[in-house]
Image: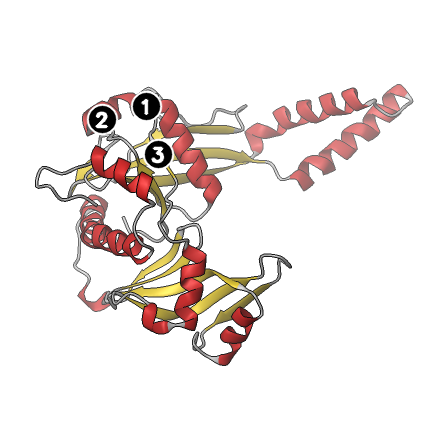
Amino acid sequence: MIVKNILPYILTKPLEDAETIATKLAEQGFRPCNSQQLESLGWAVPAPQFDGLVYEAHATMAMALKRQQRLLPAAVVNEYLSEEISAFVEREGHKPARAQRQQLKEDLIQKLLPQAFVRTQMFPLLVLPREGLLLVLAAATKTGDLVTSQLRSALGSLPVVLPKTAQPVGPVMTRWLLEPTTIPQDFTLGDEVELKDPEEESIARCRKQDLLGDEVATHIQAGKQVTKLCLIWREQISFVLEADMTIKRIRLLLEDADETPHFETAGELFAHEFAVSCTWLVPFLRDLFKAFGGLESALGASQENAFRKSDGNSQ
């Protein structure tokens, strides 16, 4: 499992153990779309050649929501619908009323569904119980909403909130570009930024250039704030951070394709990638939250109390 995007959520209470979670997920297990079904959604095996619905290793649990959709492009439906309306007019001598037109469309969709292409998507998520974190490995907020909603439905409750840091992410990133000495020591600037004027809604994007140069400074002086910023963590991870703490386009900088070990099965490859991801995820996320003052005080205190570790250390 290679982590490329992260939508982070903060757990305010611990979840149940992996076995209990797997049992509950099984009640909403994935079933393929039948011929008359537009969409099917359910929980699937998160790792190749693995039987359970919760893969647990390295103090991390992995799960996966699976969605299957029958694709009926609107242009195709409208083309067939035009033919159906023409046939109706020829048969009845008048145009169909709105309700009749809607019925024609619904009947047509049911007729076309068995012929439609099927698209299958997997939406993985990770739970880091010791850190009190739930990570949806996707870039789109609506995907995060979908996954957390389905997990809440399966578990009966899901005590998560969006991360809120003590210092607002956008203004802090803006200050980093104006005062580079304030950038935390574990981070360096990449070569990409997006800035937005909160009043005029104008957007400026700069790529593959010096972010400390005059062009970026001019945009900031004109009132724009950073909404996306490419950063590098400990010279190991390149990523783009958005103002809502969404983390996108994660790339391991030290990867060497020539040194990639050979694996006999897809399951072995998954286990290796999962182990590699788990080695950097926790320290990376700890440093990232710390860069913005940690979690907002009330949230941080609540989480620390809920996830206090036996050795007395907490996130």
Mark 1 Cα within 10 Å, few/some/many (few <14, many 20+)?
Answer: some
Q: Of the residues shown, which amino acid type is indicated by label 3?
A: Val
Q: Which badge, 2 or 3, is on the more N-terminal residue?
A: 2
Q: Considering the numbered disc 3 on the image, is that residue within a helix, a strand or a loop?
A: strand
In this picture, is 112 found above or below 243? above
What is the spatial separation of the Cα atoms under label 1 and label 3, in whole angstroms? 13 Å
Q: Which badge, 1 or 3, is on the more N-terminal residue?
A: 1
Mark 2 Cα within 10 Å, few/some/many (few <14, many 20+)?
Answer: few
Q: Of the residues shown, which amino acid type is indicated by label 2?
A: Glu
- Residue 259, horizontal then vertical, whole percent: 18, 66
- Residue 39, horizontal then vertical, whole percent: 50, 29
In this picture, is 257 found above or below 208? above
Q: Which residue is mark 3?
A: 160
Quarter-of-image position of residue 16: top left
State the mark number for residue 16: 2
Residue at image location 41% in from the left, 55% down from the top: 169
State the mark number for residue 155: 1
Q: Which badge, 2 or 1, is on the more N-terminal residue?
A: 2
What is the spatial separation of the Cα atoms under label 2 and label 1, in whole angstroms? 9 Å
Q: Of the residues shown, which amino acid type is indicated by label 1?
A: Leu
For the residues bearing labels 2 and 1, Cβ distance under 8 angstroms: yes
Most distant residue in the bottom direction? 214
